[in-house]
Image (spheres, rainbow, N blue to C red):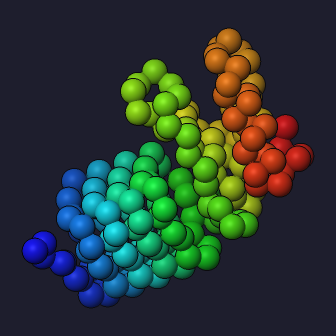
Amino acid sequence: MPLIQVFSDRCSFGEDCSFGEDCSFGEYCSFGKWCSFSKQCSFGEDCSFGEECSFGEECSFGEWCSFGKWCSFGEDCSFGEECSFEGKGEYIGDYPFLAFVGFGSRIGSKVYFFNLQDGIYVRCGCWLSDIAGFRERVKAKNADAMYLDLCDLVERKFNRKNSK
């Protein structure tokens, strides 16, 4: 039987930490860069995560959590209100982001579209911009037209017709 790790409020962890399944963290916890969490971990309100943290399936996050650049999320993660991503602001609507796997130059790489108050932002590898800037970059680089199709799909899903 796996050991469940429970941490109270205001915990602080450095870089490159690794946690197993079903970990539970209280409010106001902070994590450095490159931390990894297995599936079904839960986090209280106002937790903060450094760059390139990764989360397994079904992790849950309280309100006001903030995520650094290049974080990745497993399927069925849930987010409290007013969580913010990549320093670009809080999400709106029912979906904080959509992720698509299998695009880009690396096998298994993901493209994230964040539904934020200031607009839709796209994380594709090391590139981060609003959706209009992403469209321009795709056209300038003669990249796969499927990226533009993804932009259209995401705008419909997020109900943001004016993002072009």
Q: Quadrant of residue 31?
A: bottom left
Q: Residue at x 24, y 82 (%)?
A: 7
Q: Residue at x 39, y 27 (%)?
A: 107
* Residue 37 or residue 74, whichever sits in front: 74
Quadrant occupied by the C terminus: top right
* Residue 126 or residue 62, whichever sits in front: 62
Give percent across and percent down for residue 70. Answer: 45, 45
Q: Is residue 82 above or below residue 112?
A: below
Q: Is residue 70 above or below residue 53?
A: above
Q: Quadrant of residue 59?
A: bottom left
* Residue 3 or residue 141, whichever sits in front: 3
Residue 111 visible in rendering: yes
Q: Residue at x 67, y 28 (%)?
A: 147
Q: Is residue 117 above or below residue 135?
A: below
Give percent across and percent down for residue 143. Answer: 64, 16
* Residue 102 or residue 5, whichever sits in front: 102
Q: Is residue 139 above or below residue 27?
A: above
Q: Residue at x 49, y 31 (%)?
A: 102
Q: Quadrant of residue 40?
A: bottom left
Residue 32 visible in rendering: no
| Residue 137 shown left or right of residue 111 in the figure | right
